[in-house]
Image: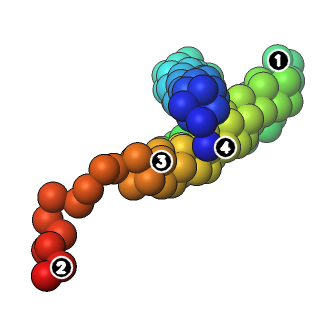
Amino acid sequence: MSALQLRGLRLAVLFSLLPGLGGLLVAATLSTHYLETLPRMPVPQELRYTPRNIHGTVVYETEEEDRRLATLEYVSAGVLVVGLGLGMVYLRQWGIANAISAEEDEYAQEQP
């Protein structure tokens, strides 16, 4: 794999890991906000009858809020997993490239 391909792979890893982590951070912040602001009992007048368990506390949200938070969590986790997989491929290719380009192993014993 050429140096240009390795650089492109490294950028793909970064552009996968950072949005994945950022999305999970936003989902955690939104979940904490829901824990603080949403009612603990169903409120049918506001259509808040979908339960969500957040750290052992059940809050009731609308179906739209539930769908939005679940989608954010799943997409962010998926993007993060793709980034981790690409990162493993990058590290493997980078290690192979360095091993091939090494001139001489400084710890190898010389043959008589």
Q: Residue at x 13, y 74 (%)?
A: 109
The x and y percentages for residue 55 are: 48, 45
Q: Which one is nearer the viewer's eye here, 33 or 111? A: 111
Element under disc 3: helix
Bin the neighbour count of mark 4 within 10 Å (Cα to Cα): few under 14, some 14-19, many 20 and up.
some
Looking at the image, is mark 1 or mark 2 nearer the viewer? 2
Residue 82 circle label: 4
Element under disc 1: helix
Residue 97 circle label: 3
Element under disc 2: loop
- Disc 4 marks a residue whose amino acid type is Val
Residue under label 1: 46
Contact check, label 3 and label 2, Cβ < 8 Å? no
Residue under label 2: 111
Q: Is residue 16 visible?
A: no
Q: Between marks 4 and 3, how big is the CA–CA gap?
A: 22 Å
Q: Which one is nearer the viewer's eye here, 66 or 103? A: 103
Q: Between marks 3 and 2, how big is the CA–CA gap?
A: 25 Å
Of the numbered discs 1 and 2, the one sitting upstream in the chain is: 1
The single residue placed furthest to the bottom in the displayed view is 112
Bin the neighbour count of mark 1 within 10 Å (Cα to Cα): few under 14, some 14-19, many 20 and up.
few
- Disc 3 marks a residue whose amino acid type is Ala
